[in-house]
Image (tube, helix red, strand yellow):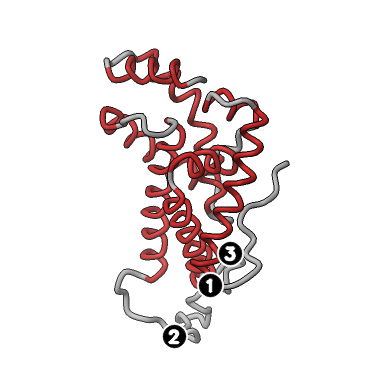
Amino acid sequence: MDREAEHALISRCQEGDSVAWDELFDLHYAATSRFVHQLSGDYTWEDSEEICQETFLSVVKNLANFKGGSALQTWIFRIATNKARDYRAKQMAAKRGGGLAPLSLQAEDDEGNRLLDPASPLPSPDSEMLRDEKWRLVSEALEQLGGPCQEILELRYFGDLQYSEISKSLKLNEKTVSSRLSKCRDKLEAVLRRIFSKENVEVMPSKE
């Protein structure tokens, strides 16, 4: 959808057009779900669905505040990122036990059965925190880039859009899309190198 059509759709939504809201959800819900699912390797599709629902509740409440400084999908992805962080924080708080008294690893019930389950095959809280921290730093790098680079990288890698779809969304020809992506990947890598303070940072997976 080009910017003119997107602006018209947003205006209809802001006027309370229920058909327009259905169109907006049809256009952006699936891409947002894929985006959320990529934020953490251990999110289930149920987790992604819950985060998406929270995201679109926020979209409904805040669409009037959307100023059109970026593509609508980019704005939605930023909301989804914040909702995913909130969701992860709740998960981590639940795993910490919420202030419950610690239980010995050797504790048994009256029949001699261990009270604690065997170690979970899921990633440990520490590994989850490291992954979330890395994602936070990538998000920070994108925010530092801002503008056209942030927008086109989010559409390509998190929205999983093809060059032709980005071309329509940003009103650019596909050759310009390819060139801008290449330059913006280089800029993002430079920012990430500064943030991570080390060499050989793999910025984004290749999607040629």
The amino acid marked with disc number 3 is Leu
Q: CA distance from mark 2 to mark 1?
A: 40 Å
Mark 2 is surrounded, within 10 Å at the Cα level, by few (under 14), some (14 to 19) or many (20 or more) other residues, namely: few
Lower position in the chain sequence, tag 2 or tag 1: 2
**Residues at badges 2 and 3 in contact (C-beta under 8 Å)?**
no
**Residue under pointer 2:** 104
Lower position in the chain sequence, tag 1 or tag 3: 3
Which secondary structure lies at badge 1? Answer: loop
Pinpoint residue 197: horizontal percent, then vertical percent: 53, 72
Q: CA distance from mark 2 to mark 3?
A: 21 Å
Pinpoint residue 20: horizontal percent, then vertical percent: 39, 15
Lower position in the chain sequence, tag 2 or tag 3: 2
88 sits left or right of 34 in the view: left
**Residues at badges 1 and 3 in contact (C-beta under 8 Å)?**
no
Pinpoint residue 48: horizontal percent, then vertical percent: 49, 44
Which secondary structure lies at badge 2? Answer: loop
Pinpoint residue 41: horizontal percent, then vertical percent: 58, 56
The amino acid marked with disc number 1 is Ser
**Residue under pointer 1:** 197
117 sits left or right of 104 in the view: right
In this rendering, which labeled residue sits more in front, label 1 or label 3? 1
Of 45 and 113, nearer the camera is 45
Which secondary structure lies at badge 3? Answer: loop
Give the residue at x 36% y 20%: 10
Is residue 120 placed above or below 185 in the rendered structure? below
For residue 122, which numbered disc appears in the image? 3
Give the residue at x 38% y 60%: 89
Q: CA distance from mark 1 to mark 3?
A: 29 Å
Give the residue at x 44% y 41%: 147
